[in-house]
Amino acid sequence: MQGAGEAQHLWECDGTAQPDKPGAATERPRYRAIFISDLHLGTPGCQAVPLLEFLREHNSESLYLIGDIIDGWQLRRRWYWPQAHNDVVQKLLRQARKGCRVVFVPGNHDEFARGFVGNNFGGIEVAEDAVHTTADGRRLWITHGDHFDGVIQCAKWLAYVGDHAYEFVLKLNRHVNSFRARAGLPYWSLSAYLKHKVKKAVNYVSDFERAVAAEARRRGHHGVVCGHIHHAEIREIDGTLYCNDGDWVESRSALVEHHDGRLELVYWQGVGAPAERAAPAVHA
């Protein structure tokens, strides 16, 4: 990132994003809470247009931004900030102004924002972590999850190398899906396919999930909502609910809480298409 002042400017600048639908502010929010992470604004891999569509179609009483919202690692190397990315920021600010509680928990790619913990930018709260209580009384710990990544904590240089490799896979993924779109085929994630096929990647995901769930349990919470590994999931681990909301560079996924406390993963398919439910809603 080009410095703290530049980062703060991204949250405060005026934009030209399209207004929301008339009357949207007077309707009951569709969800009690929405959890999203790993937008990676500031990179070509960010699917900003579909994200903006999702935010316009899905409102909530609370919105949790669980890290890697702005990709400071990439922006330090190369400035990339198209209008669509600015529109997403403006949409988030507008939701806060309309009464939605917006909480930003920074991750490793936007770690610069950890210097602003306790501050409020345009109605968006910046917090180290948070606790969300569902309608049915479950306490969910909100954390990005990078503190449980051994590569990030012990060999940050290796994380940067991995980030370059991941960027290459995303570029290849865009080319593959451009060809698939011309052929009339649906979107397919190359990196997700590789994660599921490579044994070490599968073990890494499993170890991460267990470590995060164990810490939530140690803190006395019923569950955890995190991001970081770009692998959407809802499952119980040793009696603790583990939720990962996925990402917006590959899966276009979000975790949502219904007004009765049910938790569900949704995948955005585009305007006019119903959001795909890939995991059953989870009650207490």
Image (cartoon, rainbow, N blue to C red):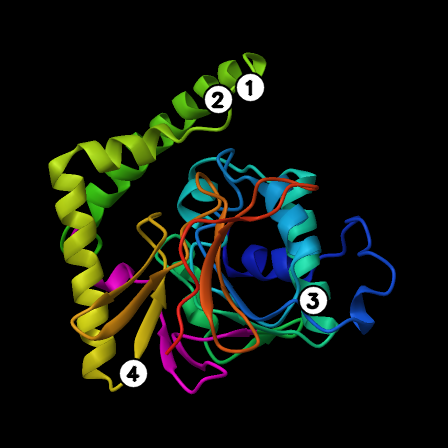
Q: Residues within 10 Å of mark 3 (few under 14, many from 20)?
A: many
User: Magenta segment, which residues?
Assistant: 125-151
**Disc 4 to disc 1, how far (Cα)?**
43 Å
Q: Which residue is mark 1?
A: 181
Residue in view at x 69 percent, y 57 percent = 91
Q: Quadrant of the C terminus?
A: bottom left
Position of residue 189 measured from the top left corner of the image (x, y, whole percent): 39, 31
**Residue 131 lies in the magenta-colored region:** yes
What amino acid does circle 2 point to?
Asn
Q: Is residue 212 left or right of residue 2?
A: left
Q: Residues within 10 Å of mark 1 (few under 14, many from 20)?
A: few
Q: Which residue is mark 3?
A: 95
Q: Which residue is mark 2?
A: 177
**Disc 3 to disc 4, how far (Cα)?**
28 Å
Q: Residues within 10 Å of mark 4 (few under 14, many from 20)?
A: many
Position of residue 93 measured from the top left corner of the image (x, y, whole percent): 68, 64
Q: Is residue 221 above or below residue 22?
A: below
Q: Residues within 10 Å of mark 2 (few under 14, many from 20)?
A: some
Of residues 284 and 110, the one nearer the viewer is 284
Secondary structure under tag 1 reads: helix
Position of residue 95 measured from the top left corner of the image (x, y, whole percent): 69, 66
Q: Which residue is mark 4?
A: 221
**Residue 156 lies in the magenta-colored region:** no
What amino acid does circle 3 point to?
Gln
Please name which of the two marks, 3 or 2, marks the residue nearer to the observer: 2
**Disc 1 to disc 2, how far (Cα)?**
6 Å
What amino acid does circle 1 point to?
Ala
User: Do tag 3 and tag 4 residues touch (Cβ < 8 Å)?
Assistant: no
What amino acid does circle 4 point to?
His
